[in-house]
Image (tube, rainbow, N blue to C red):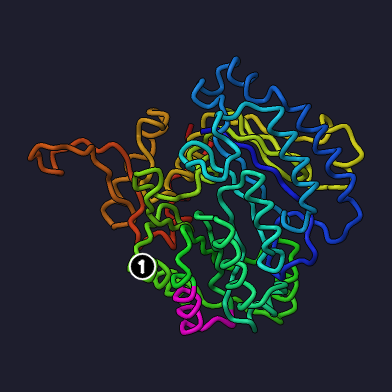
Amino acid sequence: MSGIYLHIPFCNSKCIYCGFYSVVGQKYKEAFIPALKREIFGRRDFFTRNLSEGNFSSHDEKLHTLYIGGGTPSVLDISLLKEAVGCIKDTFSFPLEAFSSAVSPDIFEFTVEVNPDDVTPEYAHELMNLGVNRVSMGVQSFEDKHLSWMRRRHTSEQAVEAFRILRDAGFNNISLDLIFGYASLTDDEWMHNLEKTVSLSPEHISAYQMMLDEGTPLERLEEKRSYMPPEEEICAAQYAMLQSVLKDAGYIQYEVSNFAAKKVMDGKETLLYSRHNSNYWNRTPYLGLGPGAHSFDGKNREWNLPDVAEYCSSDICDFREGEILSETDEFNETVMLGLRRTEGVEFSGLNPNLLNKISDVINRLVEDGSLEMVYEESDDDVQVASAVAKGIKIPPEKLFVSDGIIRELFILNFII
């Protein structure tokens, strides 16, 4: 289920915590689309070439996801967005049913990120007409004082109104983003955010702990001792609250930060997880377009430099860097990304020689409860103790400390 990610590198303002590449202002918006179209044309053989080279299977040749993120895609004039999407449609191979807002996400998922203050009835209908069938909206909080501190441009009331507008426009697959783990957030306020989110009944919820990303205003405040992150125990408690509230509300956690609801679509019950983001965790090929965007061809990674001025003026072929992944890189990456998912990672997808090197570590982590063995499902009465393990996963209560668990499983170059 290969996909394309399109990075829109523009924002009207920068949030206090955001480490993603973007620029503020109008200067490069008109020049961006011609540059993007040059890149699209220059990358037209990305999937067919890598298929012929054996980097991935024919199953991945036809594209099943398109994700437009940023930055803030909703600050880009809708006519420019249409021009970009039209070029992508004309250049790459999609299922026949693609670009219809009524199509099932199992066939084609087309996501656009929006900010609540950019959502109007007119804009929502334009997205529907473009074929968008999933919207991801950055709410972050329903506490106005926290939104103001984060330098968000919307209020809690605007977020609720934006959600209503999207529903009225016909969107039945909406994801909301929340943030926890920052100094001024109390447990009561976090509970209010969770309950308010659940009351809206979005199909998907993403929740992230606030981090001190390099070069952000928040990092500079921390360096000046004007901001102190909360203790790890407080963040862990808020994460546990997140898991508990969303589980009780019927959401299924499928990744460290992501929760999805089940909904009947086309006559069948469907878990509305993010198909596109799952490409990253499954190491499925994807093409990144725009300054700062990353690509993966099934074997190796490459990325565009995060500089919109250079992107708009240079030869796109000279604007890219990359790395060739070693066997060790592939192993560590598969373990890391697989264990972010609640279903875990299967042994069959790992290099057996490298897997054998960490067998003692796996057994120790299983014994102390940091990992669980995953067994083949069976209809007979064979006890789990005698069944063959097919993989490992991190139990729900340990997902908050998953980074530390995963690091213990990395193969280091000196032991190869």
Q: Report the side of 312 relative to 69 (left or right).
A: right
Q: Nearer the viewer, residue 131 or 304?
A: 131
Identified at 36% across, 30% down, the residue is: 348
Q: Main secondary structure of the magenta part?
A: helix
Report if residue 298 is visible in the image.
no
Q: Nearer the viewer, residue 372 or 36?
A: 36
Indicate the position of residue 182 as horizontal and vertical percent values: 58, 75
Q: Nearer the viewer, residue 83 or 377?
A: 83
Report if residue 116 is visible in the image.
yes
Query: Residue beneath label 1, please?
Result: 249
Indicate the position of residue 272 as horizontal and vertical percent values: 44, 50
Q: Report the side of 354 relative to 372 (left or right).
A: right
Q: Identify whether 289 is placed above or below 114.
A: above
Residue 345 found in image quarter: top left
Residue 395 found in image quarter: bottom left
Indicate the position of residue 176 as horizontal and vertical percent values: 54, 63
Identified at 71% across, 82% down, the residue is: 226
Q: Report the side of 204 relative to 294 (left or right).
A: left
In the image, is residue 101 part of the stretch drawn in magenta? no
Identified at 63% across, 82% down, the residue is: 144
Q: Identify whether 213 is placed above or below 380.
A: below
State the extent of the magenta-drawn residues as a range: 183-196
Identified at 54% across, 33% down, the residue is: 97
